Image: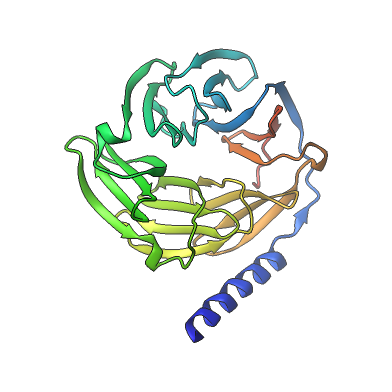
Amino acid sequence: MQLRLIKAFSASLFLLCMANNVCGQDTKLTKLWEVSLSGIDKVATNNRGEIFVTNNQGYLFQYNASGSSVNQLATSLSAPVTNLDAYNTVNIFLFSAALQRFEFLDRFLNPISSLSINEAIASGWVSQACPGNNNSLWVYDESDLNLNKYNLTTNELVQAQALNTLIQQNDLKVVLLKERNNLLFLQIAEDGLYIFDNLANFIEKIPLDTHNRSVIEGDYVYVIQEGQLIKINYLTKESKSIAIPKESNFEKLGLSSQQILLANEKVLAVYKRPKDL
């Protein structure tokens, strides 16, 4: 009981410090372009500035940095995409929990491979999945509440972490699973961002009271929360924020080196990225 109180106090203290450090700046975002699209679900970018959007029927749309439509694809998933990851400019990763299936596309949206979870790995029911280094796949398996890493070449389990011993919740809603900089980031809705090393060893938690998916870039976590775009250095815990247009109820976020992507279910709006964000 004492340990739980200490953890709760530490989390509250972090949020208080973050609130004190996060000062909504007066920076006014400059809109570059926007596009209307029905049922926007996920947004992502790569370091070429290309923009990828999925809708709730599993269609994938590609735009260039100027807003011109480049391509669109009815993916083999044909269902809502649980995870869209375009970070690797060589390929694009998509995973559907509803279909228990993932696929890789090249940057021109040509299929490279498409596999069911059961074809690729021996597992139960996976609610989140993401690619890892050296042809591996991270999954959160709800059947045993484990965070597992598989080698896709041999289909062998290479790392595992029992999340129920770390996170004292009965029903974990994992909204984000990403590997970046040899670290694994797992976000739980209305709870926080858990950071692991590449061996699935827990490092620390960044409290986040939102269901909106974070974006990981370098040493920073970006997330939309209460009408603010918040930037947190997960190493130093320093943070800042800027106000975003509230009238559009933006919840979806993407970042490139030059642009900020904000979206709701009907509109993708792209803004010039301030130099200090």
Give percent across and percent down for residue 195. Answer: 43, 58
Q: Is residue 137 left or right of residue 268?
A: left
Question: Which residue appears at 63% of the width and 54% of the height?
Answer: 210
Question: Which residue appears at 24% of the width and 42% of the height?
Answer: 122
Give percent across and percent down for residue 39. Answer: 65, 26
Q: Is residue 62 above or below residue 126?
A: above
Question: Which residue appears at 41% of the width and 46% of the height?
Answer: 180
Quadrant location of residue 215? top right
Give percent across and percent down for residue 153. Answer: 19, 34
Q: Is residue 21 left or right of residue 56?
A: right
Q: Is residue 265 left or right of residue 123?
A: right
Give percent across and percent down for residue 216. Answer: 51, 47
Q: Looking at the image, what colour scheme do you see? A: rainbow
Q: Is residue 237 above or below residue 181?
A: below
Q: Is residue 71 above or below residue 46?
A: above
Quadrant location of residue 113? top left
Q: Is residue 11 visible?
A: yes
Residue lying farthest to the bottom in this orientation: 2
Q: How many marks?
A: 0
Residue lying farthest to the left in this orientation: 154
Q: Is residue 90 visible?
A: no
